[in-house]
């Protein structure tokens, strides 16, 4: 049986659930590719409030993916096509959630006039993005809370959609 994933725009009442998805994706899913010190510096749950998280998501053109009315993931895209966040709850990994989110982001980016998508992608997410046409432009080593992480600047050109 295939998973039915619905994608819709973010609402303020999604704040706690999307923050939980972020923390789960970082501390559970990404733990296979990052050290405990790196995970702690990236996640920083003690520094995150639901109110601040909500303000950030509302200001970031965020979309939410739902499975059985449960928030399973979220992602955002700006008018230049930059994807700042794309996270899926570990229990929903491999069920098409990120793919549905990416389709929504591509449509939104095109509507905003972007000609490509770009993202700073984790080691964990790199294979997903590569399978969907993104190419690595650079390996990066950002520092969070004094700890060096590794991610990849990836880009994907957006072909124009033919008219219906």
Image: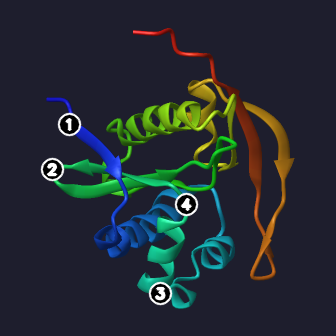
Quarter holding the C terminus? top left
Q: How far apart, in angstroms, are the residues tagged by discs 3 and 2?
A: 26 Å
Q: In this view, does 21 lie above or below 68?
A: below
Q: Which residue occupies 76% across, 46% down?
A: 152
Q: How far apart, in angstroms, are the residues tagged by discs 4 and 3?
A: 17 Å
Q: Where is residue 161 in the image (x, y as percent from the top left)?
A: 52, 15
Left or right for 107, reference 137: left
Image marks 2 and 1: residues in contact by CB distance under 8 Å: yes
Mark number for residue 159?
Answer: none
Q: Mark 1 points at which residue?
A: 4
Number of the front mark, 4 or 2: 4
**SS at badge 2:** loop
Residue found farthest to the bottom: 46
Image marks 4 and 3: residues in contact by CB distance under 8 Å: no
Left or right for 127, reference 120: left
Q: Name which quarter of the figure residue 34 lies in.
A: bottom right
Give the camera-side residue of 112 and 103: 112
Q: Mark 4 points at which residue?
A: 60
Q: Mark 3 points at which residue?
A: 49
**SS at badge 4:** loop
């Amino acid at each position: 049986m295939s998973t039915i994933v619905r994608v819709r725009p973010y609402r303020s009442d999604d704040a706690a659930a999307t923050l939980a998805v972020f923390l789960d994706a970082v501390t559970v899913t990404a733990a296979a590719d990052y050290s405990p010190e790196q995970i702690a510096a990236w996640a920083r749950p003690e520094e995150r409030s639901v109110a601040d998280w909500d303000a950030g998501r509302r200001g970031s053109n965020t979309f939410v993916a739902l499975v059985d009315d449960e928030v399973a993931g979220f992602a955002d895209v700006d008018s230049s096509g930059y994807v700042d966040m794309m996270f899926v709850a570990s229990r929903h990994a491999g069920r098409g959630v990120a793919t549905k989110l990416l389709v929504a982001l591509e449509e939104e980016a095109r509507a905003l006039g972007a000609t490509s998508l770009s993202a700073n992608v984790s080691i964990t997410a790199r294979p997903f993005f590569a399978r969907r046409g993104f190419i690595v432009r650079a390996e990066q080593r950002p520092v969070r809370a004094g700890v060096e992480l590794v991610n990849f600047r990836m880009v994907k050109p957006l072909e124009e959609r033919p008219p219906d």
